[in-house]
Image: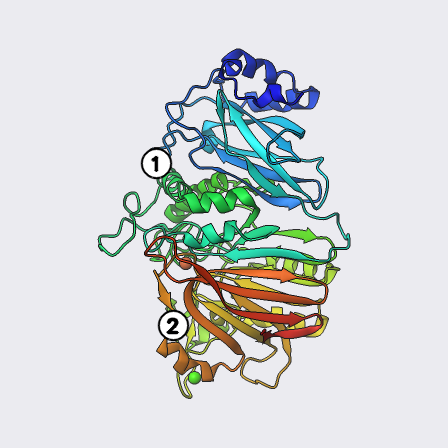
């Protein structure tokens, strides 16, 4: 009975059947179609494509107990604006309980509009909690690949285990996305991306790049769309997207290196930068499985948000770029100047900070996961008496960090775990009430994950870091290879496995677990497993 929607009989997928089906959706859908109809004038009733419109793959994201967001973007010519004519197109979707899409449990139609680059964000509701589903899109005669997704457990429900991986920093030119090929084969409930999903820079002239960016530094909406499309054509990235639901937050390179709020890296005029930021945010929204609540409004976009996994884990996903005050002391790595101690300096903005602390107070989950971008633990890179800090990280915003760490110390939310990206290297750190006093309380644990590909092959250790580690006794581990972090959570403990590939400049590199660290329930701080 489910066959008629999606069967592979090409003749059935002529214009008339698409049109008819649009009007068979029921009253609620008719209302939303009518409303959507006011936005754009023309509907493409009989979509025909010069090439596969699903060239960018499919994904899902932001799981709730009863639904997920299903994403795709119609782009038969992905690197040249997408290749769609400027009409809106009805895209059908189906959700099934089997991988062959035979037991369909939900179906619907979503608009792909030219205003949003013919992206589709279908917010499915009415599914069962904590189970696998498969999904597929259809437009005209074209069928998308089948994706797999998983709903979150019911709110507060008992959950005995959760597996997820987190990743960041996938420079297209600097390495292959082999890590995603391995991630796709893992047994995971969820993938978390912590930023630098794309890089904004121009085509590199160096010839030791494995592949090249499409054009110069991206500045316009068209540029950002083409860059996202380039990244999304990677088959291993597509595979990881297809196999799991994703939760994404950005860092700086989705817009511009080391930007802070309204301030561009090189202090471009504020209005010019806000225009650029608006276009970058829009392209980001268009290419990610985000809910309508994250739809950008001009240069603003609501990205920080909460996800719950039963009574086991609460994910508080932060945006440490949009609301930041400028990096103090002229950015870079240096001895802190007075500006760094400004009590009004902020990484999150006051509103998000209240939301975070309030969320931690109210959470009843066993593990409270703070997903964010830049390293929270102190890292002194000045060997000897002198203390040198990176001004782009929490080290550049000590007052803001102290507010969070004192909250953890005084209010003791259950098992705070910070997961971080940004620095293209693996780290494990105890979060201390006072980093300069190794005897002070450990109030949380931070796992920093390396890049997928940024900075090329990397190496296990760096002599420079080895020399700096004695300055930082709360750091338990460092490694500079490429990969991702796989996490297994139970009510009793948290385990992080640092998965690293041997190379990203040559294809098919194997993956190994370089090290594993465990946090026991009720005991902040990581211990080496094995
Ligand atoms: Fe990066
Ligand atoms: Ca020092």
**Ligand 2 quadrant assignment:** bottom left
Q: Which mark is residue 333?
A: 2
- Whole-percent x, y for residue 162 in the image: 66, 56
Residue 487 location in percent, x, y? 59, 61
| Disc 1 Cβ-to-ligand 1 distance below 8 Å | no
At which x and y percent is residue 502?
39, 62
From the viewer's perspective, tell me whether residue 192 is left or right of residue 55.
right
Q: Quadrant of residue 266?
A: bottom left
The foreground one among 159 and 410 is 159
Instruction: Residue at the far right: name it.
Output: 157
Determine crowd level at label 1: few under 14, some 14-19, many 20+ residues with C-alpha closer than 10 A: some
| Image-quadrant location for residue 494 | bottom right
For the N terminus, which image quadrant? top right
Compare marks 1 and 2 and give the one earlier in the sequence.
1
Secondary structure at badge 1 equals: loop
Q: Residue furthest bottom?
A: 385
Left or right of 467: which side holds 295? right
Q: Which residue is mark 1?
A: 79
Camera-side mark, 1 or 2: 1
Within the image, what quadrant is residue 220 found in? Answer: top left
Is residue 255 visible in the rendered image? The answer is yes
At mark 2, the secondary structure is: strand
Residue drawn at point x = 39 percent, y = 67 percent: 331
Labelled pair 1, 2 in contact (Cβ < 8 Å): no
Look at the image and tell me whether residue 317 can be seen: no
In the rendered image, residue 509, in percent from the top left (x then y), is placed at 39, 57
């Amino acid at each position: 009975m489910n066959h008629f929607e999606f069967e592979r009989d090409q003749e059935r997928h002529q214009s008339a059947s698409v049109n008819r089906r649009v009007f068979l959706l029921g009253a609620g859908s008719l209302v939303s179609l009518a409303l959507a109809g006011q936005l754009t004038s023309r509907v493409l009733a009989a979509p025909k494509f010069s090439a596969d419109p699903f060239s960018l793959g499919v994904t899902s994201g932001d799981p709730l107990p009863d639904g997920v967001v299903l994403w795709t973007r119609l782009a038969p010519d992905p690197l040249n604006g997408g290749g769609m004519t400027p009409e809106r197109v009805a895209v059908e979707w189906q959700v099934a309980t089997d991988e062959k899409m035979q037991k369909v449990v939900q179906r619907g139609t979503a608009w792909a509009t030219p205003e949003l680059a013919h992206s589709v964000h279908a917010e499915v509701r009415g599914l069962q909690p904590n189970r696998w589903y498969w999904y597929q899109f259809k437009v005209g005669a074209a069928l998308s690949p089948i994706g797999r997704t998983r709903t979150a457990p019911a709110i507060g429900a008992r959950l005995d285990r959760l597996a997820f991986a987190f990743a960041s920093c996938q420079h297209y030119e600097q390495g292959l996305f082999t890590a995603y090929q391995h991630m796709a084969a893992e047994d995971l409930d969820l993938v978390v991306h912590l930023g630098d999903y794309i890089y904004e820079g121009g085509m590199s002239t160096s010839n030791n790049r494995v592949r090249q960016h499409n054009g110069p530094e991206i500045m316009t909406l068209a540029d950002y769309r083409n860059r996202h499309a380039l990244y999304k054509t990677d088959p291993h990235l597509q595979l990881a997207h297809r196999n799991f639901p994703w939760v994404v937050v950005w860092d700086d390179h989705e817009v511009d290196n080391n930007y802070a709020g309204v301030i561009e890296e090189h202090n471009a005029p504020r209005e010019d930068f806000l225009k650029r930021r608006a276009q970058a945010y829009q392209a980001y929204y268009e290419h990610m499985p985000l809910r309508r609540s994250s739809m950008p409004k001009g240069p603003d976009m609501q990205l920080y948000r909460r996800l719950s996994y039963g009574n086991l884990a609460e994910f508080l996903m932060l945006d440490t770029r949009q609301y930041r005050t400028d990096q103090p002391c002229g950015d870079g790595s240096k001895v802190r100047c007075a500006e760094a101690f400004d009590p009004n300096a902020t990484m999150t903005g006051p509103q998000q900070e209240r939301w975070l602390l309030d969320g931690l107070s109210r959470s009843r989950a066993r593990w409270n996961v703070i997903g964010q971008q830049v390293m929270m633990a102190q890292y002194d890179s000045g060997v000897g008496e002198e203390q040198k800090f990176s001004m782009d990280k929490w080290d550049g915003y000590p007052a803001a960090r102290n507010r969070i760490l004192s909250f953890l110390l005084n209010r003791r939310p259950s098992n705070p775990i910070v997961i971080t990206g940004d620095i293209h290297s693996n780290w494990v750190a105890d979060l201390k009430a006072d980093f300069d006093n190794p005897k002070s309380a450990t109030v949380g644990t931070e796992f920093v994950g390396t890049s997928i590909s940024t900075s090329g092959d990397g190496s296990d250790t760096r002599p420079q870091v080895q020399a700096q580690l004695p300055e930082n006794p709360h750091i338990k581990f460092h490694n500079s290879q490429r990969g991702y972090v796989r996490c297994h959570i139970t009510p009793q403990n948290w385990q992080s496995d640092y998965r690293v590939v041997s190379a990203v400049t040559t294809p098919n590199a194997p993956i190994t677990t370089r090290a594993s660290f465990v946090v026991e329930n009720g005991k902040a701080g990581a211990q080496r497993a094995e």
